[in-house]
Amino acid sequence: MTLTTDQFVGSKHSQIKNLKILLPSLINDQLFAFAPDDDWRTIYKKYADEGVDRNPFVKHFPREGIEIVQYWINHEQAQKSWAKEFKIKYNPENWFLEILEAQILREDPEVIYNTTLTVIPYSFIKSIKKRIHKKIFWICYYGVPRKGEFKIFDQYDLYLTGFDEFESQLKESSQIYEFFPHYFDDLSVQNKIKFQDRSIPFSFLGSLIYKSHTDLGNYRRLIVEQLLDKGKLECWSDNTSKNPYKVIRGKLLYDLHNFFNSLPIGMHLLTHLPPFRKVKNWQVMPNPNHFVNPRFKKKIYNSRYGHALYRVLGNSKITLNVHGQVYGRVGPPVFTVGNIRMFEATGSRCCLLTDHIVGIDRYFEPDKEVVTFKNQNEAKEKSEFLIKNPDYAESIAERGYQRAKVNHSSTVRAKEFLEILKNYA
């Protein structure tokens, strides 16, 4: 079915059932290893079997009569395999956009939902709009920092966001938007273990990014490290860095080299000391931004995704969440409430211990449906209390789960997205 421009506003609800929605989405393309001859269908099946999906709420749509087509547009092997099957010619240096263009033209959707703002250039959208014979309703999820041309909102008919800070920016820019928070995938939850039988007393699943020059991630990292060192925390995070000490040492030598080189004449010759002579290129700064603290390496398991992530959460009595930061309109990054782990944890029926961020009561009632802390020491004290008082932790877990099930599941978000389509598309 083709909707005219006028029909996009005030269309009857029955027309929604005939929509085709295309989602050009990003995926962790390094998560699984594939043979060189594995085609895109094999790759997609592996992600589906493992429950890894950026937009699991759309799995509810086919029963509503809405056709969903989702492509992992950054997965080079999958995209090029798709292009080969459908005999699409493309410039190898511009495969990302040219294959995406071919997919949009072939699928001929009524709605395109781009789930990451900075992925598709505005010029690309303008070009596609000129080539398609009908009106397409363009939706974009705004959940990442804006940069370059994306500092200005453009080309989209509707924005979605699940963060207060970004909602404020959309409102101030007079954009048409809907608040659309994260959620848990109720089709992936495998939570049949009784609370008393769960074998993991206290868990953390998430990134432990290290950035020495900003606060981004350091707050979370320091809390996790303290609980690993002095608490009963078990951790699942990126544990792939092979030689972090070498990277840290290189960064220290780089900084010392520049410091010595700036000293008065004579003293700058310290840069000729043996440790510095071994470094060939002082124009390249070693970057230790991403690594797991080597001291805790043996205490940290590899990251979990999809069904595997929900299995860990479902087997945890208590789990830790520490929010990240987003970039405000001005100034440094700010903490904002509403990250996905908060919903995955409560949806898995485990007791959530999370940092107290302004606006958290928009989702859960603090110290009734989740337990909150305001600093590192309080995180340690409350985690110890919850571990020693399992009945109390279980009551928090149950109330948090009931709230998540009613307000924050993929089923609920699918219904909310359907209402958005009815109102705008």
Image (spheres, rainbow, N blue to C red):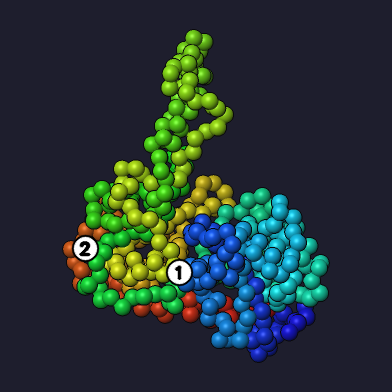
* Occupied quadrant, residue 203: bottom left
* Residue matched to label 2: 387
Coordinates of residue 385 in the picture (x, y in percent)? 21, 61
Relative height, residue 223 to residue 362 (above, below): above
User: Which residue occupies the foreground of this view, 165 or 233?
Assistant: 233
Coordinates of residue 32 in the picture (x, y in percent)? 49, 60
Would you say residue 400 is visible in this rendering?
no
User: Which residue occupies the foreground of this view, 406 or 341?
Assistant: 341
Q: Residue at x 35, y 69 (%)?
A: 311
| Mark-to-mark CA distance, 1 and 2 | 31 Å
Given the image, on which type of amino acid does mark 2 rest? Ile
Coordinates of residue 184 in the picture (x, y in percent)? 44, 72
Q: Residue at x 61, y 54 (%)?
A: 146
Label 2 crowd bin: few (<14), some (14–19), many (20+), radius 10 Å: some
Label 1 crowd bin: few (<14), some (14–19), many (20+), radius 10 Å: some
Farthest residue in the top direction? Answer: 266
Residue 253 image label: none
For the residues bearing labels 1 and 2, Cβ distance under 8 angstroms? no
Marks 1 and 2, the one that precedes in the sequence: 1
Asked if residue 345 lies left or right of residue 36, the reply is left
* Residue matched to label 1: 50
Given the image, on which type of amino acid does mark 1 rest? Glu
Coordinates of residue 62 in the picture (x, y in percent)? 57, 83
* Occupied quadrant, residue 127: bottom right
Relative height, residue 209 to residue 171 (above, below): above
